[in-house]
Amino acid sequence: MASSLPVSRRTAARALVALVVVGLFAPAAAQALAPGNSGTPGTVGLEAGTIDAEANGSTVVAIQGFHFQGQGSQKKPARLVQVTPDGSTDWVYDGTNQNARWFYDVDPLPNGNLLVVGTNSDGTTVAEIDRETREPVWTERFDFHDTHDVDMLPNGNLLIANMRNWNEEAQRSDDRILVYNRSTDETVWEWTFREHYPNATDGGFNEDWTHVNDVDRIAEGQYLVSPRNFDQAVVVNRSTGGIDYRLGSDGNHDVLNEQHNPDWLLSEDGNPTVLVADSENDRVVEYERRDGEWVETWAVGSGQLSWPRDADRLPNGNTLITDSLNHRVIEVTPRGEIVWEYYATWGPYEAERIGTGDESNGPTMADQGATGSYRLYGSAGLIEGTGDSTTFAATAQNAFAGTALAGPARAFATRWAHVTPWIRPVWMGSWPFAGAVAGLVLLVGWALGEVIVAREAIGRGVRKATENVRTR
Ligand SMILES: [Ca+2]
Ligand SMILES: [Ca+2]
Ligand SMILES: [Ca+2]
Ligand SMILES: [Ca+2]
């Protein structure tokens, strides 16, 4: 019985309840007192999510930005961002520095600089940028439209994925990959898709026939190429001109569905392995070649990721994923735990962990004994660019999904989501509001409890008052 508690324990209980109430109200109070918009314009929409432990190096993120029919949004700029191991924004390089509407691929070069691809209204700009000073070492302009990827070969030549190479006169696609010598300004090698694919592939020629979005040198004279619209990744042999390997086929979306950024790994047994952002399937997937067949060995985040466009295997066995339309970069363990997370609006294209080489450099999932399909967990659940969390209603509903309480939880979440926006102040997030409501409920309960505890004294007082009235 509460009323039999010694005063000191009752006082302690009151203090505890008061503390909880203050704790529940604190987030709402903090938002009430916060200035209108935190952060400077350059850092809006850049923030850490889950950081379980410091990452094994800085992370560079290439953010595409958003333009619609040439009209840019100042709130959605193309930018490169370097993030420290503990998730702080180290520096921001704005795309307007090189007149870029969009940034696509970024590669760390052996000399420590960055190779960056940006596109503007009338072509593509490739630049080598000093990572410390952010000054361009050199810049090269191409009359190529919307180029997503350029890599540097060991001899300094540029390997270019040349999409949207429409030949108006011949009414055909001349989409190709090519090698360009910057010293002599010459194309020294090229490989044109229409010479190696049925011209009816993916519905036939159009201005964006292959959408070839990535090319990597995987060995001397072998290039891994990603014609996105053909739902496949292929290894092109530079000397024979043939296709040495082919993963996926046009329209077979069970294998790949308009992928981005395939990376080549080798298992301990020497089996070719491809780690790839299977973008339209909203997952990252890994295939290993065994006995002449591609076998799906690992997948993560199926249906949880939103249009992922890059996945790099790290030396520690984790995978660095660019989750483009969730506007974040995450480092994920083989079994799906998010251990490092950074939000980067708008539309990050790809990420690189500095000090781990270009793209993937680590063990296959099969070699780590982690085959299978895994769900992601451990996200901070921020709503990108707002600093707010996933809504209270959504979390309440998800917490009980699949249990006997799923029905009532869904009903509660729906009612909550429909009612609270009308009464919640615009400056208050859904979680601080839920906290404030819980604080209010607790406060009312506390007051009722005090009344019950004090009922004998109140009763005596009431009786005495009544008697006084009667004796008058
Ligand atoms: Ca590149
Ligand atoms: Ca590449
Ligand atoms: Ca990659
Ligand atoms: Ca990458």
Image: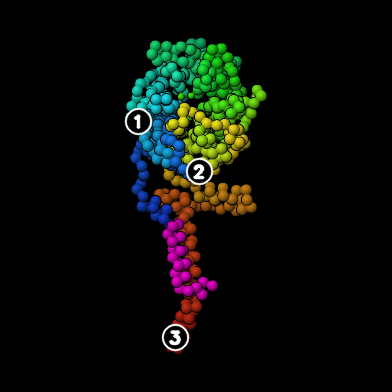
User: Which mark, residue 379?
Assistant: 2
User: Which amino acid does the dot numbered 1 rest on?
Assistant: Glu
Q: How many residues crowd around disc 1 within 10 Å: few (fewer than 14), some, or many (20 or more)?
A: few
Q: According to the image, label 3 marks what residue? A: 468
The foreground one among 151 and 273 is 273
Above or below, comparing residue 182 to residue 257 in the picture: above
Q: Nearer the viewer, mark 2 or mark 1?
A: 1
Above or below, comparing residue 219 to residue 355 in the picture: above
Residue 195: image quadrant is top right
Can residue 44 be seen from the camera position used here? yes
Number of dots carrying numbers:
3
Residue 319: % across, % down: 52, 35
User: Which amino acid does the dot numbered 2 rest on?
Assistant: Ser
Above or below, comparing residue 344 to residue 128 in the picture: below
User: Which mark, residue 132?
Assistant: 1
User: Which amino acid does the dot numbered 3 rest on?
Assistant: Asn
Q: Alpha carbon of mark 2 to alpha carbon of mark 1: how far?
A: 31 Å
Q: Which residues are magenta?
A: 1-24
Which residue is rendered at x = 53% and y = 35% of the image?
317
